[in-house]
Amino acid sequence: MTEKWLSLGGAARMLGVHPGTVRMWSDKGILPVHKTQGGHRRYKYEELSLWAQTHNKSVAIEPERMMQEVTRNVRMQISEGRLQAEEWYQKLDEDARVQYRMSARSLFHGLTTYVATNGADAENEAYAIGYEYASRAHRYSLSYVDAVRAFLFFRNALIASVIGVYREARVPSRESAETIGKMYAFTDQILVSLLQTFQTLNSIR
């Protein structure tokens, strides 16, 4: 039987975490990884599946229904024209818009990882996501103000969706408040990383 190999991005999608987290786990020896002659990380599907089952379900993070509901709610908000009404979004070409529409999923993976692991490795995860938002904004010639607005758009949409799903599921207010508090704390770290990275990129321009 032919073994199934995954790229770093494929492994991240399988585990439901940000690619930066997979890279970090690999470098620390937490996650089984193989490298090609060219130095690229590759992962065996069977090894990742076993790893996920034996690590206290930490990579599952939230129930699948939670992920589906939140993603659906965010897509509804975008389809209702809220994204098209944003000034920063109007400055982008179609390729850039596609990249930004994919941002919500990346950010949600980071948020759920942070909440599920009680903040373990939060600094590295926040840096990876902040760098992603900053470098994308810089690549498409957005100002740092627009970069922040873009991030806050997706951050606020995701948190509002999580609150809605928690309310529908009748999650106790104390538990939901604690989770939302963690999300804001984590995204504040991402915002700081975004600004620091943007400043660095501008200084070397």
Image: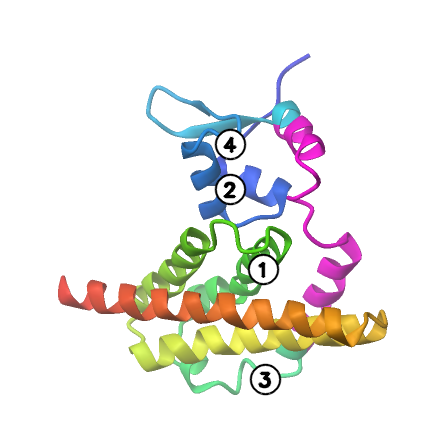
Q: Which residue is mark 3?
A: 82
Task: Specify whether residue 55 is painted magenta.
Answer: yes
Mark closest to the chain's N terminus, 2 or 4: 2
Please give the residue where the numbered disc 4 appears in the rendered image.
30
Residue type, numbered disc 3? Arg
Magenta highlight range: 48-76
Nearer the camera: disc 1 or disc 4:
4
- Mark closer to the observer (3, 1): 1
**Can you tell which quarter of the image residue 178 is in?**
bottom right
Residue under the point 43% across and 40% down:
24
Instruction: Answer above or below: position of 71 versus 147.
Output: above
Q: Which mark is residue 105?
A: 1
Sequence-wise first label, 1 or 4? 4
Q: Give how far apart the Cα atoms at labels 2 and 4 are.
A: 17 Å
Between marks 2 and 1, how big is the CA–CA gap?
Answer: 13 Å
Whole-angstrom CA distance, mark 3 to mark 1, is 17 Å
Is any atom of residue 73 visible in this view?
Answer: no
What residue appears at the point 40 percent right and 74 percent down from the top-left corner?
92
The mark that comes first in sequence, 3 or 2, is: 2
- Whether label 2 touches label 4, CB < 8 Å: no
Q: Element under label 3?
A: loop
Residue type highlighted by circle 2: Gly
Give yes or no for residue 71 being in the magenta stretch.
Answer: yes
**Which residue bears the numbered disc 2?**
9
Residue 55 location (% of width, % of height):
66, 35
The CA distance from mark 1 to mark 4 is 24 Å
Q: Amino acid at mark 1?
A: Arg
- Assign the N terminus to one quadrant of the image: top right
Amino acid under disc 4 = Ile
